[in-house]
Image (cartoon, helix red, strand yellow):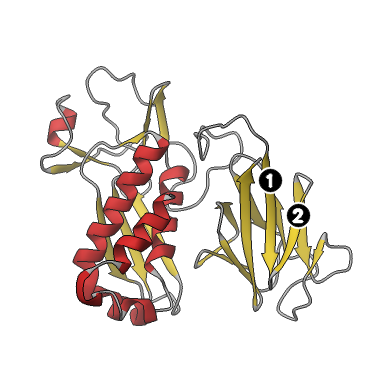
Amino acid sequence: MGVLKKFEQRLEGLVNGTFAKVFKSEVQPVEIAGALQRECDNNATIWNRDRTVVPNDFIVELSTPDFERLSPYSGQLGDELAGMVRDYAKQQRYTFMGPIKVHLEKADDLDTGLYRVRSRTLASSSSQQGGPGGGAAAPAAPQGGRPGGYGYPPAAAPAGAPPMPSAPPPGGYGYPQPAGGQRPPAAPASGGRTRHWIEINGTRHQISRPTLVLGRSTDADVRIDDPGVSRRHCEIRTGTPSTIQDLGSTNGIVVDGQHTTRATLRDGSRIVVGSTTIIYRQAEG
């Protein structure tokens, strides 16, 4: 069973329906959980062959209405999300420099249903001394003259680990790293061929080429008859991981609740173009 599915079941199983009101929000906790997974993938730093370090301190920025709905449950929801990140890291063989924390914050520039995720790596005092994780968190020092903060890896490596790169990898602040950046695969290789497809209004469209253009034009690989969709709106590129790129559309793209120009796709990613919702799917075999 997938990590996100387990997370959903844990929420549903909470006593007295604690989260009943939460699910009336435009932003669903499972969408935030998926964004935290992508934040780990996009900001993973490979230290050596056997160790990939990911952020452990996350801030989820919400619109005022969504924040007001979710904030009464922020403590319990933060704990559940932190547990989900821990489970996902175990599955992907990621490691942390300190305890995992997830905070909710209000952002006045966000519309209802949209959110942003920021992250940083905070090293615990014990990990800086080479001990096990835990203890009081100490902010990592900035690198390369850049101010410290969300999206940047720690400057100091724990005892026995090879030195960190002289500068943090490109990307961060919730955006994917550009091509050529050092990034671990999204999932362990299984040896089988991965199939990719999208679902639009219940219709499945197989992705049989490395790229798939979506738009209103008859020249698009998949035509979407929606006045809010540009002629060549966006492009999906399959790979490890698969990505989606806005092609200079008028209204942009929203991926799993976040307005973006480029994003990493995972099985079940929800893409909105105009007023049309697209579900991205992938499976081995």
Q: Under tag 2, what secondary structure?
A: strand
Residue displayed at 43% across by 49% down: 1
Residue displayed at 41% across by 57% down: 5
Give residue 214's mark.
none
* Residue 16 image offset from top left, x and y in percent: 21, 76
- At label 2, counting other C-alpha atoms closer than 10 Å, the crowd grade (few under 14, some 14-19, many 20 or more) is some
Against 66, is 163 above or below? above
Against 264, is 24 above or below? below
Residue displayed at 24% across by 47% down: 100
**Which residue is the extreme one toward the right?**
218
* Residue that label 1 marks: 195
**Which residue is the extreme one toward the left?**
135
Placement of the C terminus among the 4 image quadrants: top right
Q: Under tag 1, what secondary structure?
A: strand
Amino acid beneath label 2: Gln
Q: Nearer the viewer, residue 156 or 73?
A: 73
* 161 lies left or right of 123: right
Q: Nearer the viewer, residue 89 or 58?
A: 89
Q: Are marks 1 and 2 in contact (CB under 8 Å)?
A: yes
* Residue that label 2 marks: 206
* 239 lies left or right of 182: right
